[in-house]
Amino acid sequence: MENTAFNVEYKPRTGSEAMCEALLDEGVEYLFGYPGGAIMPFYDALPDYPLKHVLTRHEQAAAHAADGYARASGRVGVCVATSGPGATNLVTGLATAQMDSVGLVAITGQVGRPAMGKDSFQETNVMGMTLPFTKHSFLVEDPDELYPTMRRAFEIARSGRPGPVLVDVPKDVQFAPTADKGYRRLREAPPPVESPGLERAAMLLRNARRPLILAGHGVTLGGAEMELRLLAERTGIPVVTTLLGISAFPDDHPLYLGWPGMHGQASVNRAIDRSDLLFAVGMRFDDRITGAAHKFASRAKIIHIDVDPSELGKVIKPTVGIAADAKAAMRSILGHLDNAPVEGEGCKPWREELAKCQEPERCRKESARAEYGPIQIMEAIKAAAGPDLRLVTDVGQHQMWAAQFFEFTKTNSHITSGGLGTMGFALPAAMGVAFAYPEDPVWVVAGDGGIQMNIQELATIRDFGLNIKVAVLNNGYLGMVRQWQQFFHNRRYSETPITGPDYEQLTASYGLAGRTVSEGDDVEAAVRWAQEKEGCAILDFHIDPEANVYPMIPSGMSVNEMIEEDGA
Amino acid sequence: MPEPATGVALNTIEVRFTGGMLALNRLLMTLQNKRMPVAGFTVGRDREGMRAIILLDCPPESALRYTALISALEDVNEAGPAQTIEVALIEVSGDWRSAAERAGIEAHEDDGTVVASGEPEEVEYFLASLGVEDVVRLGPVTRPGAGGGV
C-alpha cells in the first residue's frame, strides 16, 4: 500500500497567497473591493483566508468605504480594484484620503508583465496617474518582493502623516510562485527629538492674555484628544477646531467655542482675529480656515505643531514651529507647564468676553429651533440616536449645517471629506464606519446632489444588513453652488437645479425603508421611526430650496468681509 | 500660483534617491504639484544611486520647507542643501581640462569661455591650480559635479 503521507506535493505559495498572508499579518479584517480580469488570481486566493471582503457596487465606493473604516477605526483601510477602469475609479477615493491624511492601502491588478506598455486591454498607468495624491506607490514586478512590499505599504500608510499607498500588481506576478523573503523595515523612523520650541511654546501659553487653541485632524489621527483636553483645562484656554478637528474636543465642554472658517461661527472667526496667541496643533491652515492668509490672526503669535515639517510656514509663518506628533508635543508642553505655575484665571476676562460675543448666536440658534429646517433635523437625529452616534456627512450646505448645529460629544464621531470636498463620499464612507463599529448608530447626512453620486451602495448596505440611517436634505438644488451663484453670479442659477428619485420608491426597490418629510410633518417622529427601523432607512427631508449657510466669508477674503445673514 | 521668483535667492538642494524612473517621476511630480519655483534641475546616476540637483528661486526658509517635503518621499535617501557654484573663465592659458579632472569638477568650453562648476572648495582648487584671476562668478547652479551627467 502506498504511503500517501509522503506524497504531498510541495507547492510554493503564489503571489496572490503572499498578498493575502501580508494582509493577515497586518491584522486586516475587511477589504472593500470589486473584482476584474487583472486581479482575478488575488480573488481566487481570497476565499482561503479569513479576510472579509465587502463587494461594493463601484470602485470609488470601495475607496471611500476603506477611508471611512480607517477614519473611524484608526487602522489602515484596504481597497481592491482591477486594472484600467477599476483603477481609474479609485482615483477620487485616493485623492480624498490624501487630502485628509487617511491611511489606506489600495491594491490594483495590472495587466501581465509581457503585456505592459503595449496598450493592452484594460491597461492603464495607475502609478503615473496617482502620483500626485498617493503618499507612495509600488509596481511590484518581482514576485518575491510582493510580501515585503505589501507589509511596507502598510507601514508607510500609517506612519508619520498617514496617507494612501498604492500597490499595483501585474496579473502574472499574482500567479507566480514566490520565495519567502520575509519582511524587513526599509527605513527606520528616527527617534523623536525634544524640540526646543516646546518649552518656548509653554512660556507663550503661560503669558498669553487672549490665547486660543486651534485643534485639527492631527489630534484625532494622533489619538491626542486627552492631551488636548488636559492642556485646555490646565491653562483655561478656549478651544476651537478645524472642520476635521470637530469631535476631537467635546462640543459641550465649557472651553469649546466652535469652529472658524468660511462657514464657521462668526464669533469664532472674530475670536481668532482678536487673539494674541494661536496654538495650532495638527492642522495645516487650509484656505477655508484662513481666507486671506495675510489678514488671518494678524495680532497673534502663532505656535504651529504638525507631524509634517513641510506644513510649517507653508501658509502661515509661525512664531514657533514644531514638527512633532500632536500627542507627544502636547504631553511635553504639559510637562513644561508643570514646572511653573499657570495662572488658571489668567485669561478669564478673555473667556468672559468670548462668552458675551457668542450670546447673539446662541439666541439666533434658539429661535431657529422652532422652525422646520436643518437645526431641527440635526437635533432630532442627536436625540434619537443618542451619545454613541457617529455622523458621516457629504459635501455642501448640509455638511456645514451639520457641523454648525450638531453637538458632538463622542471622540471621532464626525466624519467628512474636508480637504478634497468629495460629493458622494458619505454613503460609502458610512459603510466603512458601520463595519468598524457595528454596534454604534451611524447616520449619514447628505444633500440631494451628493447622495445620488454613490446611491448604488444601498445594495451593498442591504446585503450586509448595515444599520445606517440616511437623512437627505433635499432642496432641489446643488445648494452650495446655488448659494454662490446667488451671492457672486447675480442669482443666475446655471445648472444647479437638480432632480432626483422618489426616495421612498427607491429604497423600496432595494428592499429598504424610506419616508418623505416636509414642512408641517413631525421631524422628531420621522427620525425616531428611522432610528427604530431595523437596517437602513432613508429620510428625504424637503427643505427650503433657497436656504443659505451663514455666516460666509467669501473665498480669499477676511473676517471683515463676512456675510452674516440675508441682505447683509 | 507658484511662489514668486525672487531672482536673487537661489538655493540648491541635492537629492539622493533610489527607484529609477518611477522615483524620478515622483520627484518631478512633487516639484510640479507643490509649485516649487524650480530655476534649474539636473539629474545623474552614480554608484550610490541617483542624484538630482535642484535650484530653487525662493527665500531660504521656503527652501528648507521644500527640502523637508522632498525628504519625506519614500524613495529619497537624503535631501539637503548643496553647494554647487559655476564660474566662467574669460582667459585661460593652462590645461584646464586636466585641472578640472584633478579637481573633480565639470568644465566645458563655450564660445571661447571656459565654464566650470562644482562644489566651492573644488572650484577654488581648480582656479588656484590654473592661476587665473579673470573670473566671472555665476553663482549657484544645478550642474552636478563628480558622478553627474545626464
Image (cartoon, rainbow, N blue to C red):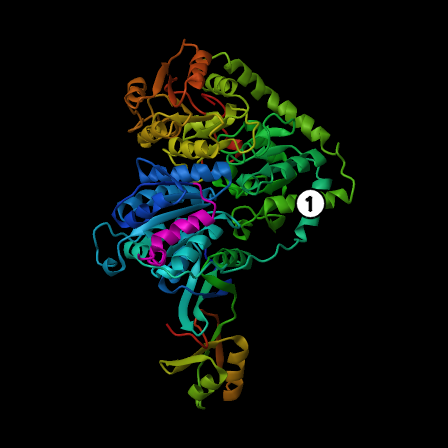
Mark 1 lies on a secondary structure that is: helix
Residue designated by label 1:
A333
Residue A521 inside the magenta-drawn segment: no
Magenta residues, as a range? A1-29
Q: Between B2 and B14, which is closer to the camera in this rendering?
A: B14
User: On the picture, is A535 further left or further right than A263?
Assistant: left
User: On the picture, is A275 further left or further right than B18?
Assistant: right
Q: Between A381 and A143, which is closer to the camera in this rendering?
A: A143
| Residue at 52% in and 18% down | A383
- Give the residue at the far front of this rendering: A1
User: On the picture, is A257 further left or further right than A184?
Assistant: right
| Residue at 47% in and 28% down | A391
Q: Between A423 and A315, which is closer to the camera in this rendering?
A: A423
Read off the chain for label 1.
Answer: A
Q: Is residue A149 positioned above or below B136 on the image?
A: above
| Residue at 62% in and 44% down | A327
User: On the picture, is A147 further left or further right than A257?
Assistant: left
